[in-house]
Amino acid sequence: MKPIDKNEQDAEKLAAARAAVAFIKDRDFVGLGTGSTATFAIREIGEMVKGGLKIKAVASSIRTAELAQSYGIEIVDLGQVSSLDISIDGADEFTEDLNLIKGGGGALFREKIIASLSKNSIIITDTTKKVKQLGAFTVPIEVIPLAYQYVFDQIESLGGKARLRKAGNKNFITDNGNYIIDADFGLIAAPDQLAIALNQIDGLLAHGLFIGLTQKVIMSQGSHIIIFD
Ligand code: 5RP
């Protein structure tokens, strides 16, 4: 994929966001993702709400909740929800078979709950996120602090090179009060198998491999919208 500059990338993010919000219907219960691409969608949804669209939403992070509320979108507590009509989120990488790496922004746990609850989980991206094989982007893994060393060692024993995420000179702390380990497994031949192995590690709250959780990826390439479903 040829490199694109930030303006082109932002134009692609906006175009993908506009294509995705067209799937939202009046009275829908909507899951809102986190990150720069999801932010474009949240702004568009805010405009639709101003124009009279009636929806309720759940947020995948504190910053998304604040942003959505600032646009007049009603936010409901995620813990009280058993189903969502639609969700819109970004991704760090995706393959054409709709598997993803997510969690670059550290919101992967709530994002995964939202994707699991959603009947129509839509991922929006620019062209830079499409890959043939997942794994150039390290796999974010949320870990409960007291299990940190155990989880770190388990990741390494699965062949991953683990690194604790930092924010400046402090540890990065998620909205859930946990750490993130970024794990480099190289290019991942069998993401579904790796996901299963990671799921078995006690103290590992969530990992950024989203396997079988996505109904559609909407990618904008220049002025073209390409839908993978
Ligand atoms: C946050 C995420 C984001 O969706 C992912 O990092 C992509 O972010 P951006 O749209 O800013 O490139 O998973 O946890």
Image: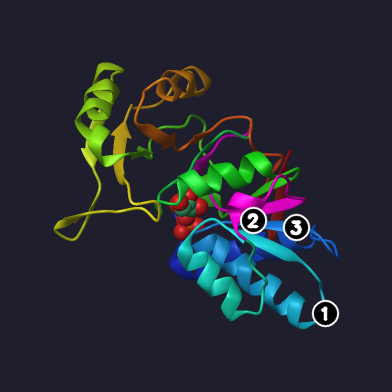
Three-letter code, disc 1: Gly
In the rendered picture of this protein, how many numbered marks are placed on residues? Answer: 3
Tag 2 secondary structure: strand
How crowded is the residue under tag 3: few (<14 C-alpha within 10 Å), some, or many (20+)? many
Q: Position of residue 195 (x, y in %)?
A: 47, 24
Residue 226, position in %: x, y?
71, 49
* Extreme residue in the bottom direction: 50
Does dot 3 land on a helix, a strand or a loop?
Answer: strand
Q: Residue at x 79, y 60 (%)?
A: 24
What is the CA distance from the residue labelled 2 to the residue labelled 3? 25 Å
Name the amino acid type tagged 3: Phe
Relative to 227, 137 lies left or right: left
Identify which residue is drawn at 57% across, 61% down.
38
The residue at which mark 2 appears reads as: 220
The tag on residue 29 is 3
- Graded by Cα atoms within 10 Å as few (under 14), some (14 to 19) or many (20 or more), the crowding at tag 2 reads many
Earlier in the chain: of badge 3 and badge 1, it is: 3
Which residues make up the magenta segment? 77-96
Residue underneath mark 1: 52
- Which label was assigned to residue 211? none
Of marks 2 and 3, which one's residue comes earlier in the chain?
3
Q: Which of marks 2 and 3 is in front?
A: 3
Q: Does the magenta stretch include residue 137?
A: no
